[in-house]
Each structure stands twice: as structure tokens, then as C-alpha cells.
Image (tube, rainbow, N blue to C red):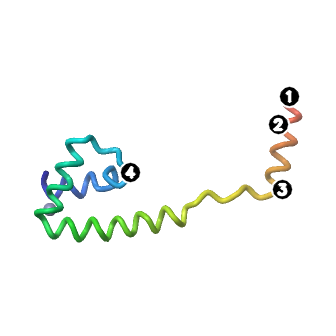
Amino acid sequence: MLCSEVRRTVYLFFEGSLGEKQQVDFKTHLSICVDCDTKTQIQLRLHRFVLSHMAPQPAPEHLKTRLTRSLRALS
Ligand SMILES: [Zn+2]
């Protein structure tokens, strides 16, 4: 795997949606390329930070009531 490929597939790697072979290639590259290894660590931290701050917010109470009402009206 090339450095450019690592940068392109890093988010797929985080999400675990890389193929088995690609995942091995990815990890192998990180073990031989300090630059990508460092960047991936930083991106992983950012990725986790973003995820933890994007937790779904509960819908506001009035919106829920309105939705329930319109759903009832429909049925
Ligand atoms: Zn690299």
C-alpha cells in the first residue's frame, strides 16, 4: 500500500469496512511507515472525538408531541 492509499482509506479502516487483505496491507504499511503511523494515530483520535460529540440528540419534547399527533391523525 502507498502513503496516498493509506490517506484515502484511513476512514474505512476506522469503520472496519476495509477488506481483509486491505486491512492487512494497511497495518503492514503503518508498521513500516512512521509518517503514516503518526498521522493515523492523530486521525483516529480526531475521529473518536468527533464520534463522541455526534451522539444523537433526543428530539425536543414539543417536536415529539407534534409528531405523535400527526401520526395519530394519519392512522
Ligand atoms: Zn506511508
Q: Quick check: marks 1 and 4 in contact, CB under 8 Å?
A: no
User: Residue 21: x, y in percent?
Assistant: 20, 42
The answer to whether marks 1 and 3 mark residues whose Cβ atoms lie closer than 8 Å is no
The answer to which of marks 3 and 2 sits earlier in the sequence is 3
Label pair 1/2, CB-CB below 8 angstroms: yes
Residue nearer the viewer, 31 or 9: 31
Q: Which residue is mark 2?
A: 71
Q: Which mark is residue 75?
A: 1
Q: On the rendered structure, is 72 left or right of 17?
A: right
Q: Are marks 3 and 2 in contact (CB under 8 Å)?
A: no
Could you tell me how far apart the alpha carbons at marks 3 and 2 are, in whole angstroms?
14 Å
Q: Secondary structure at mark 4?
A: helix
Mark 2 vs 4, N-terminal side: 4
Q: Place residue 31 in its image quadrant.
A: bottom left
Q: CA distance from mark 1 to mark 3?
A: 20 Å
Label 4: which residue? Answer: 15
